Amino acid sequence: MLTERLNTRNYSLFEKLKSVDYFLILIIILIGAISVFAIYSTERGEFSFYTKNHLLRLLVFFGMFLVLSFVRITFWYKNAYFFYAVCVSLLFITLFFGLMASGSRRWLDLYFLNLQPSEIMKIAIIVCFARYYHRIQTAEIQNYKFILVPLILLLIPCYLVLQQPDLGTSILIAGTGVIIIWLAGLNIKYFVYSALLLIVSLPFAVSLLKPYQKSRILTFFNPDRDPLGAGYQIIQSKIAIGSGGFFGKGFLKGTQSYLEFLPEKHTDFIFTLFSEEFGFIGSIMLLLLYILLIYRIISIGFYAKSFFSKLFCFGFASAIFLYIFVNISMVLGLLPIVGAPLPIMSYGGSSMLSIMLGLSIVMSCKIYSQDQISNY
Amino acid sequence: MQNRASSVEKSRLITRRVFMLAAAKLILLGGITSRLYSLQISDREKYELLSDKNRIREWKTPPQRGFIVDHFNNILADNDRVFQVHLDLDQIKDFNDIIFKLKNILELSNNELKKIYREKERLKPWDTLVASDNLNWTQFSKLNLYLHELEGVKPVVSSSRFYPYKNSLVHVVGYVGAASQKDIERKDVIKENLVPGLKVGKSGIEYAKETQLIGRYGIKRYEVNSSGKRISQIDYIKETQGEKIKLTVDLEVQQLAQELLKGKAGSISAMDIYTGEIIAMASSPTYDPNKFTHGIGHKDWGEIRDDPLKPLVNKSIAGLYSPGSTFKPLVALAALEFGTIDPERPILCKGHKHPYELYDVKYHCWKKQGHGYMRLRNAIKQSCDIYFYEMARLLGVDRLAIIAKRYGLGSNILKDLYFDEKKGVVPNTLWKKNAIGKSWYLGETVINGIGQGYIQTTPLQLCLMTAQIANGGYKIKPHIIRDESINYESARLKIANQFVNETADFSNDEKFLVDRDYKLYERLYRDPKNIEFIKDAMFGSTNEQYGTSYKSRYDDVKYQYAGKTGTSQVKRITEEERKLDLDQSQIEYKNRDHALFIAFAPYKNPRYSISVLVEHGGSGSSGAAPLASKLIKKIIDRHSLREQIEKGSTSLA
């Protein structure tokens, strides 16, 4: 009874190709293309290091996405815990053997790529939770035993990432986990209780933060506190976006980024650059593309038969929304500056890898939507 | 079946929650959109401004000062290229460190360092400090070499005032120095043009004509990156040069005048008697205005300030002296105009044994053995004091004052051009009541008759007085800044025009005997014969035997001039001293007489007037007249050149 029976059937290649979501692919290509232009602009219209790397990664990971899309969804189901375990181990290894850069140890040197395991963890946690909740009955979800296990599963990677230290990614992983627990059906009261608990413990938590993290948060509440220091990024980012106006300054004409007023314009602040050059209208278009992407993923979830697929799709869609929301709110000065890349747009291999991996699992859900995964 | 039911229930739950989540997402998206809207549409202008402020930095470039040129277009105040070091205080992190490095690179002295630190105290933390505004080329190139180590240090090529003729014209042209807080408050134009290291006029024409001279600052707009590094120049509104100020001064005459006064304290002024153009206005001792441009050193300043001959005083207009006998022509003229003397009446001068007495007070003639019987012409020619005591007594001080004022004494003659110009004193009974609070004594009238007592004049006033006698008694407007509307021909024409509708009956014109304002070129005399009489007497004084300046005469009609010497006592001569009969060289310098001389030339058809004053120079005939003689020759030699320029021929410029 405890052995899992997988209700599977064989698909012909034609069937598989027919059920590929071409619309999703189109959206990914569009966002990818925009991202190349944006990175190109950070280099003042020179096709050099960042642009080349970004384009190369985009092509490689897009290829990977296409290939992995045909991996059967049951594969992910079967290997979910293993995937999670690998990621946790990588995080563990990173803590000791990771590459040190600007005060934190986040990367593993894999020769062809500096892998950031925390980025992969973002996907692993969704896969892991989807698998976990797949088996659990609605009634059982409220059971303490079944609350405690996912909490532990979530806290381990969060803690490891926080140790790097990487507050942003840690928060994103935690947020993703919480959303999935919510989607799985945990009673709303638990969320209310924990929110209250969080607020109460906030002063205590703040005292545990690193001085630069504290300063970032203080600065968020008052950017003028130190306009040339910690508040600099927020102020300059707001100036860049605001000065873009309705139509923007035009492609390659963003003076803020061109004149190096924008910090980290390739990564976390790529939206700022885009918004400065393409204005309100461009920013809204980009947001719409992201909304379409999320919508598409959610609709794939609806048509999937298995609960695993549904939960993964909904979870992943919410995670993407979370990344976008945190990133954009951050550059708009609505949230404190924590390192959080904008999916696909931001320069960075691991982030791209993680998003493409997630998307390939989503595509797998679509192609193998008829796959039933039995609970027992 | 239960499993199946559970599965369905699970699906329904997750769908419900997805929708709830989607709603939450939409709300959050709405938040982001409204934020974008507020930044990019509502507050767009604010952020555009901030972006430009980020991107564009402005540098004001210093205005170019206008040139000051002489009558022949010689540049008296020029602009020179100078190398400066500016420190942007807001960009300097460790001020002491930068100053230490600068000290080593530029080999600054301790005094200069002190000055920099003092300056820093005064400035705001975002101001620019001019650490040195006159580096030599070696220092400047060395500075550029080390620039990468000196954040906030800016080498600047600027322009600064340069006076090629050094100390020849400092009293006329003035000098410039760093703009002080007082300067900034004084003139808006200075405030507007204020750039670090701006130099503004501190005295003379430089001070008076600041508004015209200063020019307008330029603006260089650069696109800068976040570390303030200039990326490209966007805009350059070039600075403009101030107006050129053309003076009436003749550089060569001025230089000769200064040369003649070398080693002495005194003044020489020369004027065109028809146009009122000042040809020279020398004051001695003098100093080099270039020293002030970059801030004068303590030692140099001390030397100038403490010099007992007072180089800082422009003696031509700010030095007050008793006119002595140079006042006599005017006393005589007044007596003739009021008819209080018969010029043919002889008065006996018996020398020191029988001085002039009035209420038991004795008044001596300068000539020990006396002049004998004197008529007016001879009394002027030989400068007999006894004659003038008597004449002044008959005339009365109030009548004398009317004429003295009319011919230019007792008031500022260059108006507001020089802030240090002094009015002097033309005393009368009312003046004494007001100024001293006592009644007038007749004895004071008597000594007033020989230009002693309360009367105080500046050398330039004496020059004007001489000019207005020499030109036949017409009012002129002395000026040192060229006025295109005034020239010799128009002046002569205007003088002639006033007689067109007036049949000249000179005998009883009472309106020329009262104190009133006169229009430009209006006649100042009642009877032209009186003027002619004075001019003739002055001719005698220089060109006839026994004349006081006979030794300095020219026989050549071209240079022949008419003059009047003056020797003004600076100290009352006591009876004991009079008995000792000391030679001037035996008297202590500060007690020696001032030597004065006034003249106009050429005698036939006069064009120029001149006044010479040498402080403690002894007698006018030996101390002042020879200087005047030399200068007159020079002025007359240059007359035709001057005329050519006047007529617009610039080929000689």
Image (tube, grey):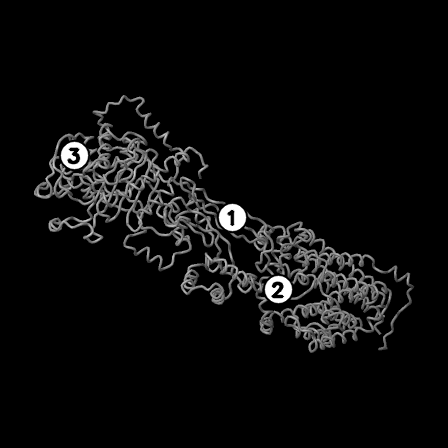
Residue B77 image point, x, y percent: 42, 47
Q: Compute the Cα span from label 1 to label 3.
A: 63 Å
Instruction: Tell me if residue B247 comes above or below residue A223 in the rendering.
Output: above
- The answer to whether marks 3 and 2 sit on the same chain is no
Q: Is residue A257 left or right of residue B436?
A: right
Q: Is residue B367 left or right of residue B287?
A: left
Q: Is residue A9 left or right of residue B567?
A: right
Farthest residue in the front direction? B555
Q: Amino acid at mark 2?
A: Pro
Foreground pick, B622 / B149: B622
Label 3, secondary structure: give it.
helix
Instruction: Tell me if residue A337 comes above or below residue A156 in the rendering.
Output: above
Q: Amino acid at mark 1?
A: Gly
Is the Cβ of the residue at disc 3 closer than 8 Å to that at disc 2?
no
Chain at numbered mark 2: A
Q: Is residue B2 visible?
A: no
Residue B15 image point, x, y percent: 77, 63
Label 2, secondary structure: give it.
loop
* Quarter of the image where the N terminus of chain B is located: bottom right
Q: To which residue does mark 2 refer?
A: A336
How many C-alpha atoms fall within 10 Å of the one at disc 2: few (<14), some, or many (≥20)?
many
Q: To which residue does mark 3 refer?
A: B395
Label 1, secondary structure: give it.
strand
The answer to which quarter of the image holds residue A13 is bottom right
Q: To which residue does mark 1 refer?
A: B218
Foreground pick, B167 / A287: B167
Instruction: Tell me if residue B196 comes above or below residue B8 in the rendering.
Output: above
